[in-house]
Image (cartoon, coloured by chain):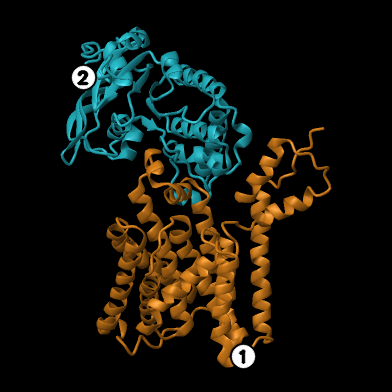
Chain colours: A orange, B cyan
């Protein structure tokens, strides 16, 4: 009578996911290089990738840690300028392009993370609206600094002639690595510590979780990937102006996270993709474009206030497992149903 | 501190623990909130495997004592020695690492997480792998996560909650939520477990089961348990030593038998004989 629920063992799960990532990369590359897509479409793909990283990284702090920062564009700016300046100065040197790309992006991430720690330590003493306002302030400070440090950053006219290094391959790999890394951290004791702070700070602390450490850690991790996204943005635009990192950019990213469902990585990815491509898709509607965009946001928030995905995360392996088990007679011993439910959340 | 030279100054300790360093030694503990003295001159020692009770009328300061022991509030006066080490100036999470774990009067679970995740968060400090280990999924990650998984299930089976491991903590029935809080506290491997009204809202049969389980926990883990409870059957049934708190001060200490017959305690609970008349 005891039908066990078929499960896909760990290494095979990873293989399936790796294969899928490789397949998508191959398909994407083929489509773009075949020339079917026009310029606007291929550059949209890069934009989508950059916004996916931004949304997924902001989701660490809003969705998993449960705080509301409004200065995400500031971290993006730090990464963008770091990477832009590095790539510009490395352009003439003997450094091979792949190495320059990796070093530039990692540097961008690290610089942004440092800023994340500097801002996080004082900011995370506050909560809710106070944290929102203080991070908003810091975001603006970063932007003003960029304007005024014109010797390094090019000031208001901007930092020009950055080598355009954000190819499809680079952006795609950065997206994949960012998402995987964040997923791996969240499914570990460190990720659980972050979640426990969101759920109940007092209980978390009495369970031996170092609250301040994990708050700052989540903040820095979020800033790190925002910095990488910034670096990609620099290599995508070839030109950086401070006005590209204003308050509205932070809000746009936040809208993606909220719309996708706070705490759901798949939600962030979907929302970032949809919201970034909508303006282009609706281009034919011209003047009504922004109206439709806004109406759509309102409708989703009314009918699905927890966001498109809620906190649910998509898992290919579990979908496959479901298909594998579809022919089994439904026998619901508590342990078995419990097993299935567990499957939904893990991995 | 020399273990053998230690003499219980305000003994409440069962005989088997007398020769050992007490797990908790509280001296002259007090706290003022503004001008109000919530707890004053609180002295108590708890043996390493003792089940101790803290009772008293509503508002007597029982939960405040727990909050002082876990440094949620910093004491205004007095000292606490946890396993011989002073807890002064330590943060709540550091005290947990030093061996004190607690549950809450108003349940504080991680509601959106599963039962197993709740327990695994308790096991956080039992695992040691780094962020890098988790990103790269190095062997340290797999090994410790597997251990934590098994340990969590084992702890859950104390309360027959193994089957609920993948339930959302918030979806558990009330009694099970209280039990999960105890399991989560136990997962942090404490030397002393503070239970704040563990039987609140439980029916008599659940309470009876809880009593067995508290004893079982003490016997299996060889730890001390201190509990606040209004259910006198539970307190008198399992506590070896009881302290009675009223208006922030201890008015009586002793075995359940002694407490039951203590006129001061009866007065605190029921009022003075003939005092309410006239």
| Residue A210, placed above or below residue B203 | below
Query: Is residue B106 shown to the viewer in this render?
Result: yes
Specify the label residue B156 is tagged with: none
| Residue A234, placed above or below residue B115 | below
Chain of the residue on which disc 1 is drawn: A
Q: Which element carries disc 1, helix, strand or loop?
A: helix
Q: Do badges 1 and 2 share one subunit? A: no
Q: Is residue B218 left or right of residue A39?
A: left
Q: Is residue B73 left or right of residue A332?
A: left
Query: 10 Å neighbourhood of mark 1: few (<14), some, or many (≥20)?
Result: few
Q: CA distance from mark 1 to mark 2?
A: 81 Å
Q: Residue at left 45%, top 51%? A: B132
Residue A339 location, x and y as percent? 67, 41
Query: Is residue B22 shown to the viewer in this render?
Result: no
Residue B228 location, x and y as percent? 38, 26
Chain of the residue on which disc 2 is drawn: B
Which of the two marks, 1 or 2, is nearer to us in this view?
1
Residue A67 location, x and y as percent? 40, 59
The residue that disc 1 covers is A285
Specify the label residue B1 is tagged with: 2
Q: Which element carries disc 2, helix, strand or loop?
A: loop
């Amino acid at each position: 009578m005891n039908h066990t629920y078929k499960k896909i063992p760990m290494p095979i799960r990873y293989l399936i996911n790796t294969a899928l990532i490789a397949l998508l990369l191959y398909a994407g590359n083929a489509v773009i290089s075949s020339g079917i897509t026009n310029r606007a479409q291929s550059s949209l793909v890069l934009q989508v990738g950059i916004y996916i990283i931004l949304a997924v990284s902001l989701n660490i702090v809003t969705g998993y840690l449960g705080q509301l920062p409004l200065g995400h564009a500031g971290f993006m700016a730090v990464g963008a300028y770091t990477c832009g300046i590095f790539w510009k100065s490395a352009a003439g040197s003997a450094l091979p392009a792949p190495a320059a790309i990796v070093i530039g992006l990692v540097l961008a991430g690290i610089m942004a993370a440092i800023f994340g720690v500097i801002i996080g330590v004082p900011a995370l003493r506050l909560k809710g609206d106070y944290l929102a306002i203080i991070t908003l302030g810091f975001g603006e400070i970063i932007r003003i600094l960029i304007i005024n440090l014109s010797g390094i950053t090019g000031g208001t006219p901007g930092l020009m002639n950055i080598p355009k290094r954000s190819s499809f391959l680079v952006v795609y790999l950065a997206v994949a690595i960012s998402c995987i890394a964040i997923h791996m951290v969240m499914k570990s004791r460190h990720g659980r510590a972050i979640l426990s702070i969101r759920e109940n700070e007092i209980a978390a602390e009495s369970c031996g979780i170092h609250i301040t450490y994990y708050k700052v850690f989540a903040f820095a991790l979020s800033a790190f990937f925002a910095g990488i996204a910034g670096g990609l943005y620099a290599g995508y635009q070839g030109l950086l102006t401070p006005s590209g990192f204003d308050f509205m950019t932070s809000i746009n990213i936040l809208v993606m996270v909220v719309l996708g469902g706070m705490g759901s990585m798949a939600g962030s990815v979907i929302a970032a993709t949809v919201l970034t491509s909508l303006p282009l898709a609706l281009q034919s509607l011209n003047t009504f474009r922004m109206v439709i965009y806004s109406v759509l946001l309102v409708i989703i928030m009314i009918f699905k206030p927890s966001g498109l995905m809620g906190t649910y995360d998509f898992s290919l392996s579990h979908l496959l497992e479901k298909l594998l088990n579809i022919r089994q007679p439904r026998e619901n011993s508590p342990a078995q149903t419990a097993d299935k439910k567990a499957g939904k959340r893990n991995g | 501190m020399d273990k053998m030279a230690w003499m219980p100054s305000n003994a409440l300790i069962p005989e088997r623990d007398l020769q050992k360093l007490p797990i908790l030694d509280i001296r002259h503990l007090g706290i003022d909130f503004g001008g109000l003295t919530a707890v004053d001159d609180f002295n108590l020692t708890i043996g390493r495997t003792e089940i101790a009770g803290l009772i008293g009328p509503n508002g007597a300061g029982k939960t405040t004592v727990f909050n002082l022991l876990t440094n949620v509030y910093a004491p205004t006066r007095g000292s606490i020695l946890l396993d011989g080490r002073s807890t002064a100036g330590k943060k709540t999470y550091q005290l947990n690492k030093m061996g004190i774990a607690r549950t809450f009067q108003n349940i504080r679970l991680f509601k959106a997480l599963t039962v197993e995740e709740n327990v695994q968060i308790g096991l956080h400090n039992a695992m040691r792998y780094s962020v890098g280990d988790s990103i790269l999924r190095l062997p340290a990650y797999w090994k410790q996560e597997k251990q934590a998984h098994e340990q969590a299930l084992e702890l859950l089976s104390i309360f027959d909650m193994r089957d609920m491991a993948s339930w959302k903590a918030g979806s558990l029935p009330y009694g099970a939520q209280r039990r999960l809080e105890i399991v989560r506290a136990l997962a942090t491997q404490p030397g002393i477990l503070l239970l704040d009204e563990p039987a609140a809202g439980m029916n008599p049969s659940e309470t009876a089961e809880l009593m067995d389980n508290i004893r079982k926990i003490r016997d299996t883990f060889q730890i001390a348990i201190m509990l606040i409870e209004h259910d006198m059957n539970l307190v008198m049934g399992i506590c070896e030593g009881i302290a009675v708190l009223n208006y922030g001060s201890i008015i009586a200490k002793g075995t359940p038998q002694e407490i039951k017959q203590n006129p001061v305690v009866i007065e605190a609970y029921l009022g003075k004989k003939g005092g309410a008349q006239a």
